[in-house]
Image: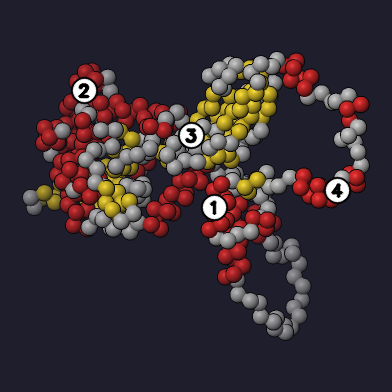
Amino acid sequence: MAKNIVVPHLGDSVIEATIIKWTKQQGDTVKLGETVVELETEKANFEVAAEATGILASIRKEANEDVEVGDILGTIEASASKQDIKEDTEEPAEETKAAPEAPAAEIPQEKQQEEEPRTRVTPVARNIAEQNEVDLSQIVPEGNRITKDDVEKHLESQKTREETPQELPPEEKIPEAPVSPDVFPSLSQLTANRERRMKMSRRRRTIARRLVEAQQTAAILSTFNEIDMSNVMELRSRKKDDFKERYGVSLGFSSFFIKASIGALKLFPEINAEIQDDEIVYKDYYDIGIAVGAEGGLVVPVIREADRKTFAQIEKEVRELAEKANANTLSLDEIFGGTFTITNGGVYGSLMSTPILNPPQVAILGLHKIEERPVAVNGDIVIKPMMYTALSYDHRIVDGKEAVQFLVRVKELIEDPETLLIEG
């Protein structure tokens, strides 16, 4: 009895994936619950397990192919052996080939046309084509089916042709003496063997699409401030050994900024909200996303109910999520959602930046490199460890006044960490 290997539910709003690799080959024995194929989605990687013990009888989708939820990836023959499969795939006896070897001319033309294979179209591609009145028969897919990318490329090429001005009749020109190609080599000659092409991963494609969508759909503004890190650095230096001995984790800056952000979010709830159609959804919980630059691309794991967790719990969770991000083992529950995001470009040496929103969130806090700078204190010039901070926000529901005051409150709490510890 054959059992299909099907692309499972991948999480809310995720309908497509890319096959990374098959961990089993056709004809291999598989056990119930054993991983047979790995998928990559825009958020995380998935392992698809066998739903029966038997033989991997067929592989219908190969590595690097795009698939959708519900697609059949292959089949497992639960009651077959390798010998059974081998016998099933052997050439039929001569006497059984008579009918298939009948001349094609004897088959009616109409029947031949009906039996010609049709190019498959993914549901997403079909919807886009219908919305834009695209004739699918005019599209030549890159693979064995028409995907969303094929339709979008077709639309882009149509747009380019429409925008190209009509060519005017060429003007008469005085013939010029031919120039030897050796004198002025073409660009292709100059760059030959000096370029490499690599297909973007699904995660990188998703990151690119979401960042463009964020800029196109939200009214993004940024406001800036600077924070004197002296007191929090002194507190960390004083408490770090005791903290690590007691909790088994180092006391970093993450927990301070997460706690300070929550304190400011409670004062300005619209920054912890999102827009749904013509409504503002206010959220009375604080799931804080921490942007991590993993090897496969940017991911934002989420610390759930961060307002209810201690400094030690937050530091442990930040470390665990970062390790999972770098190992590409984050689960969907650890990625989806989030009400507010913090990104730290300072770990890479960034002095100042304007972070982009993480939709549907309406604000993101950017942290930067701590650098000693001369500042005025009570009329005197002193050297202080300073950090620039940036808050990018969606001006559709967050006004400049609230954005500035939010960042000021974060500054006040970080510069007075004793108060932050008491309120936290």
Q: Which residue is mark 2?
A: 243
The reply, left or right, for residue 215 in relation to residue 6 is: left
Q: CA distance from mark 3 to mark 2?
A: 42 Å
Q: Residues under labels 1 and 2: Cα distance?
A: 56 Å
The reply, left or right, for residue 95 in relation to residue 43 is right
Residue at point 29%, 43% (across, down): 340
Q: Are marks 4 and 2 in contact (CB under 8 Å)?
A: no
Mark 4 → mark 2, Cα distance in angstroms: 83 Å
Image: 211 above or below 23: below
Q: Secondary structure at mark 1?
A: helix
Residue 197's x, y, as percent? 61, 46
Dots 4, 1 in contact, CB < 8 A:
no
Q: Is residue 70 above or below residue 362?
A: above
What is the crowding at mark 2: few (fewer than 14 residues within 10 Å), some, or many (at least 20)? some
* Residue 275 locus on image (x, y percent): 31, 51
45 w.r.t. 53: above or below: below
Task: Residue 116 in the image: state x and y as whole percent.
Answer: 76, 46
Residue 83 visible (yes or no): yes
Depth order, front residue of 375/390: 390
Q: Which mark is residue 127?
A: 1
Upstream in the sequence, badge 3 or badge 1? 3
Q: Is 39 drawn above or below residue 352 in the view shown?
A: above
Foreground tag (3 vs 2): 3
Q: Residues within 10 Å of mark 3 (few under 14, many from 20)?
A: few
Q: Which residue is mark 4?
A: 108
Q: Residue at x 36, y 30 (%)?
A: 321
Apparent side of residue 247 relative to residue 101 in the rendered image (left or right): left
Q: Left or right: 62 with respect to 227?
A: right
Q: Amino acid at mark 4?
A: Pro
